[in-house]
Amino acid sequence: MPMQFLSKILITSTTRQPHVLSRTATNLIAVFSGDMLSKFLGALTTILLIRILSMQDYGLYTYFLAIMQFIPSCIGIGLNTSCTRYGSEYISRFNRAPTHLYGVNLQFQLLLYIIIVVFISIFSTSLSEHLIGSDRFSSAILIGGFASIGPIILQILSSIFQSSSEFTKYITLQNTRQAILLLATFILWLLYDLSFFTVSLTVLLLQLFLSIGLLMRLKSFFKFGEFTVRNLNTLLASGGLLSLYFSILSLLGQMDILIISRYRTTEELATYGVAFRYYSLFLTALSSIHVVLLPKLAKVEFSSHSIQLDFLRKWIKISSIFSIPILMLILLSNSILSTLNGNKYSGAVPLFKIFCIGLLISLLFSPIINLIIARKDYKFLVVTALIVLIINSFSNYYYVPKSGIMAACVISVTSHAILNLCGFVRVLTS
């Protein structure tokens, strides 16, 4: 199991605090196990939708997901990362949660959400026409914009659990969300003919009700009367650059969808969306590693450059073992995807094989970003991500209209590989 391998790395990297490291290993195993269950439930929902929705509807749903995930990424990931770091330090010093900062974080993100949704409500048709060349995706943009409120709140609550090391609650939240979506999709399939509108509206309402319900139960974590310039500056002090970095990263992750939507057919977008969805399901299993390592690597026992390098070398050495199962996944992808999807998405198979190469690269270098964040080297992250985004944008714009979705796939994997390799060199040399 990957977490057992990581446990070995953590324990052998340093022996000065064995109890702390043992607890870290336990948290990693617990989060990974819960995360795998969450991804399994998400995979079942994805398979169900791929087999039931028409290619036209799944193309719209792919764009809906892109918008729904892009907005929380731009608004919240950097701020929540900053809150996690600050909250972990604050709790360790004062033995209480920084409710003033959590309240400011929630109010600031909701304010940004309202501004974005008002803009999308007015200009959804114009956005679709200018970004894609027609108005056929205006409904996906509009519903995706409104639906982003659920993930925004759920990510804030997850960051609170993460900063206080309450990983059981973190896991429960992720699994509850996926279980509800799977159950609702199955019930809709039994009772109605599924379409883009029924599925997207269901996702919107379920995540909204879940997030508001949990927010009401956890309202003691938020102080809403302290939205001051000082507290906002505390939030933005490190979160500002991190927010910019993750916004660039989110845009980088959606550039392929944007260019395909504009210059290729909806059926090609659906095919690309299928391959990318399976890749994402495998890739996001690594999020359990980041959940535990983000607050951990910021602490003093990993502040030494030599310990960081030792950790990284052992991680790459042991995680390279997974090249064997990933190779098997590539070899068996024809049979696996045809069994899961049927024959209408046969074009997704070669794309998925290329994405598997990206999966291996991401696995090998997965601790890199956490190490750079722990060093507070935010400017390097922003500059590198911006350069890669520019290269990615021009490459997609030039090659995708001519060469299709295969070019988009290769460009996406190459871009993320460049990011990882640049970070690796930075950690080695700085």
Image (cartoon, rainbow, N blue to C red):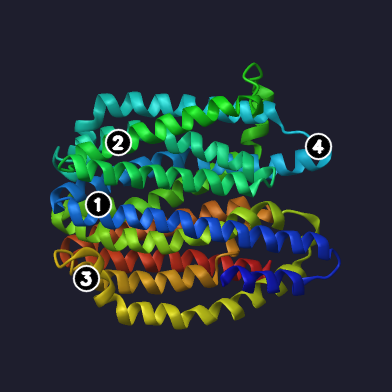
Q: Quadrant of residue 233?
A: top right
Q: Quadrant of residue 11?
A: bottom right
| 171 and 422: which is toward the camera | 171
Q: Which residue is mark 2?
A: 202
Please name the amino acid that badge 3 sits on: Ser
Mark 2 closeness class: few <14, some 14–19, many ≥20 residues within 10 Å: some
Residue 381 image position (x, y, % from top left): 56, 55
Q: Which residue is mark 1?
A: 49
Which residue appears at 74% of the width and 59% of the height? 23
Please name the amino acid that badge 1 sits on: Leu
Spatial distance from mark 2 to mark 4, Cα to Cα? 40 Å
Q: Dot 2 lies on which element?
A: helix
Indicate which disc, 1 or 4, sits on the residue closer to the N terminus. 1
Q: Which residue is mark 3?
A: 338
Q: Dot 1 lies on which element?
A: helix
Is the residue 381 above or below the residue 307 in the image? above
Please name the amino acid that badge 4 sits on: Asn
Q: Which is in the foreground here, disc 2 or disc 4?
A: 2
Which residue appears at 80% of the width and 56% of the height? 300
Q: Which is in the foreground here, disc 1 or disc 4?
A: 1
Q: Kindly identify which numbered label has been placed on residue 179.
A: none
Q: Are marks 1 and 3 in contact (CB under 8 Å)?
A: no
Indicate which disc, 3 or 4, sits on the residue closer to the N terminus. 4
Residue 105 image position (x, y, % from top left): 58, 30
Residue 331 image position (x, y, % from top left): 32, 82
Indicate which disc, 3 or 2, sits on the residue closer to the N terminus. 2
Q: Which residue is mark 4?
A: 95
Q: Are marks 2 and 4 in contact (CB under 8 Å)?
A: no
Q: Quadrant of the C terminus?
A: bottom right
Spatial distance from mark 2 to mark 1, Cα to Cα? 13 Å
Q: Quadrant of residue 413?
A: bottom left
Spatial distance from mark 1 to mark 4, Cα to Cα? 45 Å
